């Protein structure tokens, strides 16, 4: 019984680990995401009245986290940023929920951010209408994984069945 319980425990820990770390890609290749990010940067600078400065290369700083840097300082209106990001990602076919953060270049503190989720209840868009001052900003988009609660329930169900099975063998 001890060996069976140990085996079941190892299985459950392994299964839980796989479920907890499974990250579904956002439906597009890294190259397609980079193009969408550059389009966001282009639209953001155009909206700020800048049609000449460069958008620096997109960086994937972690899995599913992309950062965009700009050659010049700019100001932005959160409403426009939200619309630009939503429109561009939708047009690019990227459907995953995401978090957008605007960071200060020097200290990487978040000066503005919002979250777009799969349902209205998971969408958070604060501070609309507040113009952000001219500054050096980085734009970071973090795509959220699609691991659903049903995956966790599956692991719990398997755990429950295993416990019943082990208890019934006594």
Image (spheres, rainbow, N blue to C red):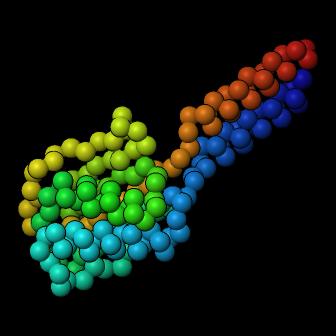
Residue 6: image location, x then y, percent = 81, 32
Nearest to the observer: residue 22 or residue 128: 128
- Residue at the farthest front position: 91
Q: Is residue 100 left or right of residue 165?
A: left
Against 135, is 151 above or below?
above
The residue lying at 73 percent from left, 22 percent from top is 160
Against 119, is 71 above or below?
below
Q: Is residue 44 left or right of residue 20?
A: left
The residue lying at 14 percent from left, 58 percent from top is 77
Q: Is residue 156 left or right of residue 57?
A: right
The residue lying at 18 percent from left, 85 percent from top is 52
Q: Using the rendered image of the protein, determine whether residue 135 is visible from the camera's viewpoint.
A: no
Nearest to the observer: residue 6 or residue 105: 105
The residue lying at 39 percent from left, 63 percent from top is 91
Q: Using the rendered image of the protein, determine whether residue 39 is visible from the camera's viewpoint.
A: yes
Q: Name the image quarter holding residue 46.
A: bottom left
Q: Name the image quarter holding residue 12.
A: top right
Residue 146: image location, x then y, percent = 53, 47
Against 165, is 85 above or below?
below
Tally the numbered discs.
Answer: 0
Against 7, is 129 above or below?
below
Quadrant assignment for the N terminus: top right
Nearest to the observer: residue 137 or residue 127: 127
Residue 90: image location, x then y, percent = 39, 59
Quadrant assignment for the C terminus: top right
């Amino acid at each position: 019984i001890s060996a069976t319980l140990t085996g079941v425990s190892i299985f459950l820990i392994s299964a839980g680990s796989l479920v907890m770390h499974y990250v579904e890609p956002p439906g597009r290749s890294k190259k397609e995401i980079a193009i969408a990010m550059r389009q966001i940067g282009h639209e953001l600078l155009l909206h700020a009245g800048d049609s000449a400065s460069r958008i620096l290369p997109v960086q994937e700083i972690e899995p599913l986290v992309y950062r965009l840097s700009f050659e010049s300082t700019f100001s932005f209106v959160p409403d426009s940023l939200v619309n630009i990001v939503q429109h561009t990602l939708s047009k690019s076919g990227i459907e995953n929920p995401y978090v957008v953060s605007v960071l200060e270049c020097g200290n990487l503190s978040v000066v503005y951010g919002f979250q777009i989720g799969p349902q209205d209840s998971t969408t958070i868009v604060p501070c609309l209408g507040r113009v952000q001052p001219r500054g050096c900003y980085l734009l970071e988009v973090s795509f959220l994984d699609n691991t659903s609660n049903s995956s966790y329930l599956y692991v719990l169900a398997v755990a429950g069945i295993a416990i019943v099975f082990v208890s019934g063998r006594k």
